[in-house]
Amino acid sequence: MTTEYGENFSKRNLLLGRQLHIVFPNVNTLYSQLSWSHYKVLIRVDDPLKRDFYIAEATKNAWAVREMERQINSLLYERLLLSQDQTSVMAIAKGDAIPTKPHQIIKDPTVLEFLDLKPQAAY
């Protein structure tokens, strides 16, 4: 099809179009604020709730593709679910706030019992 219709009809693009149709079967659910590049990143997100979260945040905050991909790779959705202070996590994710304490970034404490060390926050 590439020779007949051009490079936009390559095998890779056709597979991506098929994947887009599988993930978003209703064309009316697509957002005009998001580009094809946004959707190429979003179709790799398996969880529909997580995908809907990133779509909402990308449209609300006008995220570029790289910013959205950075937020997905930094597990923003999971950090928000686990966080007790969701507003500060969102502020850090948007760049409005800078983390000043380790517990704002590291959510899982390290267990060092195999080293016979006493549990301390200073570790």
Image (tube, rainbow, N blue to C red):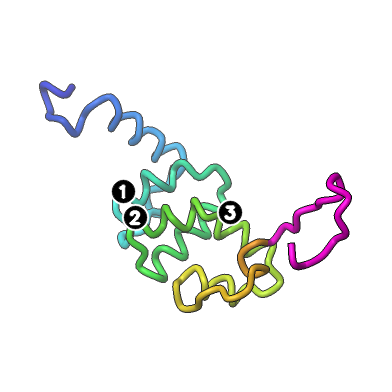
Majority secondary structure in the magenta region: loop
Q: Residue 100's spot in the image, x, y percent?
A: 58, 76
- Report the front residue among 81 and 25: 81
* Residue at image location 58% in from the left, 54% down from the top: 49
Residue marked by disc 3: 49
Q: In the depicted view, which residue is nearer to us: 62 or 92?
A: 92
| Circles 2, 1 touching at the beta carbon (< 8 Å) | yes
Residue at 31%, 59% in the rendered image: 32
**Label disc, if present, on residue 65 of the rendered structure:** 2
What's the residue at 40%, 70% (across, down)?
61
Under circle 3, the secondary element is helix
Label 2 near label 3: C-beta < 8 Å?
no
Q: Is residue 49 magenta?
A: no
Marks 3/2: CA–CA distance: 19 Å
| Magenta highlight range | 107-123
- Which of the pair 43/18 is nearer the observer? 43
> Dot 2 surroundings within 10 Å: few (below 14), some, or many (20 or more)?
some
**Image quadrant of residue 63?**
bottom left
Name the residue that disc number 1 marks: 37
Looking at the image, is mark 3 or mark 2 nearer the viewer?
2
Secondary structure type for disc 1: helix
Amino acid at dot 2: Val
Among numbered discs 2 and 1, the one appearing first in the sequence: 1
Q: Amino acid at mark 1?
A: Ser
The residue drawn where x is 58% and y is 71% is: 89
Residue 115 falls inside the magenta stretch: yes
Query: Which kind of residue does numbered mark 3 sit on?
Result: Leu
Q: Quadrant of the C terminus?
A: bottom right
User: Counting other residues with Cα less than 10 Å from the Cα at mark 1, is it few (<14), some (14-19), or many (20 or more)?
Assistant: few
Count of marks placed on residues: 3
